[in-house]
Structures are given as C-alpha cells and as structure tokens.
Image (cartoon, coloured by chain):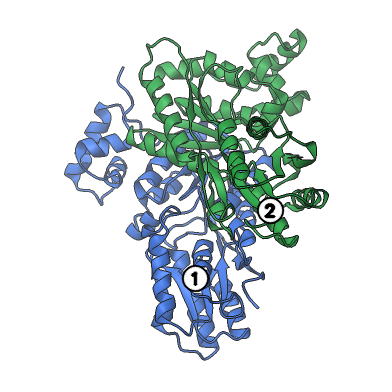
Chain colours: A blue, B green
C-alpha cells in the first residue's frame, strides 16, 4: 500500500514551497492555474488527504485543544500552557502541543496535522517567520472551514478571531516611567527588530514614555537586536552588541530590555564595566521568568501574567466550541501587565 | 448525535479510577468481572472507541512522533524535545507533545488520545505519580499492541522497550569527587524522596563517592525534599528546609544538589548565612539549564546533554518504525554526563 504523502514531501517533489502546495490544494487564486493543477494531480496520485476539517467537525468532538507555540524553551509560553491546561482540565478538555520553532513551514505542517481530526480548535501564537512573511492563509482557511482559533501575544489584525494580548505599550511605559521617576537621565532600550510585533509595541511604549516626559528619544540609545542571531546557546552576538552600547554611551544610567534574557545579559555587561546595580545603572526587563527571580541582583520586570493569558484563551475557545449557534463575533481581550519591583531598580 | 465519551467521564460516571476503566476496557484480569462488565457496557452505550492501535497501524503511517513529558516548565525536557525535533525533521517526521503534569491519570489519557491514530510511536519520560503507583499497564498494553515506545531519563526495568538514560550514578560521583578533591570535609546532598528514580540514583552516586574515599555518610547531611511540596511558585518550603540544613550543620563546606533549582536556592541560603561561594562553601548542581549559566556566581553542574538524549531517542524510535520485520530486541543506551566547571567551585 502507498504510504501517505506529506505536505513537505509534495513541496520537495514539485520544487515549490509548502505554502504554495497548501494554497494550491485549496484552489487559491493566488497560485497559477498550472501549478494548482500540478499540485492537485500529485496529491490525488499519492492519495493525499487534505484537511477535511468541516467533515471531521460534524462527526465528532475530540475534546482536545491544539496549541501551537513558536518555542518550547521559553518560560512565558510554558506559563501560558499551564493556564490553558488549568481551564481545559476543569472543563473536561485535553491539550496537545505542536511547535513551530519560529518557522512558517512547521507552523503550516503542524496545523494541517492537528486539524485533521485530532482536535476541536486551536490556541496559538504566530511564528516570527510567519509575521515576517505576512502569509496568513493557513489561519484564515482553518477559521473559514469552521474550526475556531484563539490567538495570544503575537497576533495580527488581518485575522478575524478571538485574541488575548498584553498591553505591551502600557507595560513598557510603566517600566520607563519607573526609570525616569527614580532619576535616570540616559535610558537605553534593548529591543528586537520591528517585525516582531511585541518588540515593536514595547519600543513604541518606550518612545511614548520619553515623549510624555518631554525627553527627546536618541537613536544612540536604541539597540535593535536581530533576534534570529540570538539563541540561548549563542549569546555572544547579543553580548557584543550590548558591550558596544555601553562603550558608546558612557553616561548610560538606565536600561529597559524587552525580554528577560536581554536584561540578564545587560546586567552581566554592566558588572564587567564596574557599574553597580542599581546605584550606577538601573535595569528593568519584560516577562517574569525564573531568571528574573533568581538573578543576582534580582530583576525588576514587567510581568505579563502568562498563566492568566492562557486561562483566558482557553475560556474563549471552549465557550466558542460549546456555543456553536452563536453569531460570529470576535473579541480582543487585553490582560494588564504589572511592574514587579526587585533589586535591580531603586 | 451522541458526543464521544472520554475515559475521564467514564471514570467519573462509574465512580472508579481512570486506571480501572482503562484496564477493564482491555479485559484485564486485575479487574473484577463485575466491574469489567459494567465498564464495557457503559463504553458500548456511549459509543466509546477504544484504542485500536493495531488497526490504525496497518492502515496508515502518520509520520508523527508523540512525546509525553511530565512537565513543560523544565529546561531539561525542552532540550530533549529540541533533540528529538532535530532528528525527526531530518528524517521527515513531525512531533506533537502531550503533558502528564506528573499525573498518572493524565499520562494514561494522553496516551489513549495520541495512540488513537495520530502517531506512529511514543517517546516519553514517566510521571512521578506513575513511578510511585508502579502501575505500568498503559505502557505494556501499548507496546504489546505493536506501537513502539522509547523511554528516556525516568525509566523502569519492568517495561520492555528501548531506553535512553544518563549515567546518574557516575554523574553524581563526578560531582562529589570534585568537591572532595578541592578540600570539602562536610558535603551535604540535597535530593528528592527515593521514589523518583533519578533522585535515588544520584543519592546512590553520592554515597558511593564518599565510601570510595573512606568517608562515612552522615544522615544529618542528607536532605530528601518532598518534591510534591515544591513548585517553581512555592519555593518557601524548599528554602526553609535548606535553611535548617545550614543551621544544623555549621561546618557545611560543600553541597551537591540533584537539580538546578535546589542548587540555586542553596546558594541563596549560603549568601544569607554570609558564606562566600566558593571560598567557604562550594556548590554543584545537576542539569545544565539557563539558571546555572546565568546565576551569580555561575553554577558548576553535571550536564546531562538533554539534546543528545533527545536525538538518540528519536534515532531509536524511527529506526524501529522503519524496520518493522526485525525481531524484537531492546537496548538501553547510556548518555555520558559531563561536569561543567564554573564559579561555584574552586
């Protein structure tokens, strides 16, 4: 018997992208007729079963929620999953987790796989590559076939679904305000490139806080790290860039980092430069993970309440699953952030 | 149409445990005939589809590996998953992750769900509750129905399958030898209760290292923490117990902790007691996670090479899946640990 062919194998055989195969199978007009015919013929030949969500939805309830997250080595995502599980278990649902590893292709593959009868709905956070490519067809197709999606943290306006986000702008403003109020004159931000939506919003919060205090933002104090060059095992690039920030700004007395790891490395560099924390320089991070809590000095940080986010996404999804007749209305829930003050600030 | 009933719902309705339902459905002689009849009748009435692994195996290859881990907020497990993914992706497989949350029931439920046609085989690490209850029927049934399992880290002899483990005993000996060789006279171990197999083995390594150096182990220096009382958000119990260890042993000059968190908290307590690290007291942990790397001082630790473990489990599982005719032979692969020396030791 022929083995079942996967999206990935079809893409390789036909020398096109996974996105193209996925779109062609759905007869999307974005793909040339020629390519569509080719892909569809190939799929038929190899007995590829496309994603019959609508069919499977009618036939059974799996009582299972599919979660797709970009990264597993990430305290925030773990907390969100814990929150989802808490609500899911209470209401009789199970969860399974797929990982996109920040890759567009893996996100598409995982959704195809899970949507094929294993789950009732998705809770997900978009991969960085998908955000960069701005190709959201797999989300829209899934929703239009009747399978609900709830997105959290990394979301985009273009997709009609329930969303749970943190007030990234307000959270950043809380952090920068704290630095200003405790006397910092030259506050740097260590952030990501702008295509990462949460990085962009946190940068915006930093700029707004400065402006509200009649301070002029200076480009020398804004470090945008290319997150693709930074992994937990390769922190040298990050450290070198932060070194440079310190060397070029001898007057630096405050740092706001848009995540925990950036903040921890910034504290390390500060120590190397013999700057005392918080006396000479204050540091605030974003995301309240184990590193913030156990660092020396412990890190003041903006907590996103990951567990609360997870709980809310699960409530939204399960409500939607259990009230199928309701008209389509989507909401965006904002979970408030909180500044947790520890030893790295005055 | 009737909704599909779950194992959990059946257990609740019939007021028996999930394990009983699961065994009764398989007609296990461990369960009384009366209960078996009741469960089977209920399952039939509510259209419960038991786990037709053998059937689904014949019909299709999902090219998907199911991973079941006890905890997601755990750097070691994240590393293992990364290793599994690396090999799986190279060989054309996808992975999905289920979480047991250290619960026996959730482990059984997750395996039932995934084995129902979603995956080709399992890679898993046993939950603490399962180890404590010593009820392994769900593993044995799955294997006997023809679905391969590879276990890692937390394994038991009673189950016939491929296993990947670390040399916990040898790893601990490396740590304790280092402490002895650098002059420690009174070395404490902070470990778990014995039912957690890795904790038990690491304690054994500690005892053996002492004996090989003609030292007599002293119970006052052995702290066995009840891991069920310790969670990342409730570290007070752990801290109090370690405080007590310090107060009752003023001569303490070396600590070997069987995981990273215990070691980090021990360093915190040492600081409170004005003991300098490593001058007055040396500390070594087990598991090389982010906390060890970024702690101040950074932590000397026994690295388990989680990624390597993951890679090996994936190789074993995929080899088994792709060579079905081979006779049943199981192997246990031991991945060597390594002592990573940092600032917390001399």
Q: Secondary structure at mark 2?
A: helix
**Mark 1: which secondary structure?**
helix
Q: Which one is in front in this view, the residue at disc 1 or the one at disc 2? A: 1
Percent position (x, y) of residue A221?
Answer: 43, 80
In the rendered image, the vertical position of residue A330 relative to residue A299, given as above or below? above
Chain label for disc 2: B
Closest to the observer, B215 or A103: B215
Measure the C-alpha gap from mark 1 to mark 2: 25 Å
Task: Give the letter of the chain under mark 1.
Answer: A
**Looking at the image, which is closer to me, B135 or B287?**
B287
Displayed quadrant of residue B62: top left
Where in the figure is residue A9, as x and y percent of width and height? 28, 34
Label 1, residues with CA under 10 Å away: few <14, some 14-19, many ≥20: few
Q: Which residue is mark 1?
A: A272
Work out whether A149 lies above or below B129.
below
Return the residue nearer the eye: B96 or A299.
Answer: A299
Q: Residues within 10 Å of mark 2 (few under 14, many from 20)?
A: some
| Residue occupied by mark 2 | B265
Q: Is residue A239 above or below residue A128?
A: below
Q: Are marks 1 and 2 in contact (CB under 8 Å)?
A: no
Can residue A326 be seen in the rendering of this structure?
no
Q: B170 left or right of B101?
A: left
Callouts 1 and 2 on one subunit: no
Quarter containing the N terminus of chain B: top right
Q: Residue at coordinates 64% horizontally, 41% vertically from top-left? A: B258
Viewer-proximal residue among A286 and A295: A295
Image coords of residue B343 (percent x, y): 55, 56
State the mark number for residue B79.
Answer: none
Residue A283 picture location, percent across and down: 56, 73
Which residue is drawn at the image coordinates 67% and 69% (left, top)? A342
């Amino acid at each position: 018997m022929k083995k079942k062919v996967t999206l990935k194998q079809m893409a390789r055989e036909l020398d096109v992208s996974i996105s193209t195969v996925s779109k062609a199978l759905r007869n999307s007009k974005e793909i040339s007729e020629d390519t569509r015919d080719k892909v569809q013929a190939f799929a038929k030949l190899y007995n590829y079963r496309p994603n019959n969500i609508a069919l499977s939805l009618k036939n059974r309830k799996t009582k299972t929620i599919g979660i797709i997250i970009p990264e597993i080595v990430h305290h925030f995502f773990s907390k969100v999953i814990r929150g989802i599980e808490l609500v899911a278990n209470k209401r009789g649902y199970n969860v399974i987790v797929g990982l996109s590893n920040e890759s567009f292709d893996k996100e598409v593959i995982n959704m195809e796989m899970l949507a094929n009868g294993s789950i009732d709905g998705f809770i997900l956070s978009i991969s960085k590559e998908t955000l960069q490519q701005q190709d959201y067809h797999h989300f829209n197709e899934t929703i239009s076939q009747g399978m609900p999606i709830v997105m959290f943290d990394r979301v985009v306006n273009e997709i009609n679904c329930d969303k749970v986000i943190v007030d990234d702008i307000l959270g950043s403003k809380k952090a920068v305000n704290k630095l200003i109020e405790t006397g910092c004159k030259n506050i740097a931000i260590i952030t990501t490139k702008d295509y990462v939506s949460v990085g962009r919003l946190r940068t915006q919060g930093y700029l707004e806080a400065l402006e509200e205090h009649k301070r002029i933002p200076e480009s020398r104090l804004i470090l945008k790290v290319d997150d693709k060059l930074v992994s937990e095992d390769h922190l040298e690039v990050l450290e070198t860039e932060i070194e440079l920030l310190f060397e070029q700004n001898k007057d630096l007395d405050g740092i706001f980092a848009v995540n925990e790891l950036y903040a921890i490395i910034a504290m390390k560099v500060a120590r190397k430069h013999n700057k005392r924390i918080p006396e000479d320089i204050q540091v605030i991070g974003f995301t309240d993970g184990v590193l913030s809590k156990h660092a020396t000095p412990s890190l003041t940080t903006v907590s996103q309440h990951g567990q609360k986010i997870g709980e809310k996404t699960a409530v939204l999804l399960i409500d939607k699953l259990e009230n199928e007749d309701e008209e389509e209305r989507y909401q965006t829930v904002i979970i408030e952030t909180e500044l947790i003050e520890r030893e790295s600030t005055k």
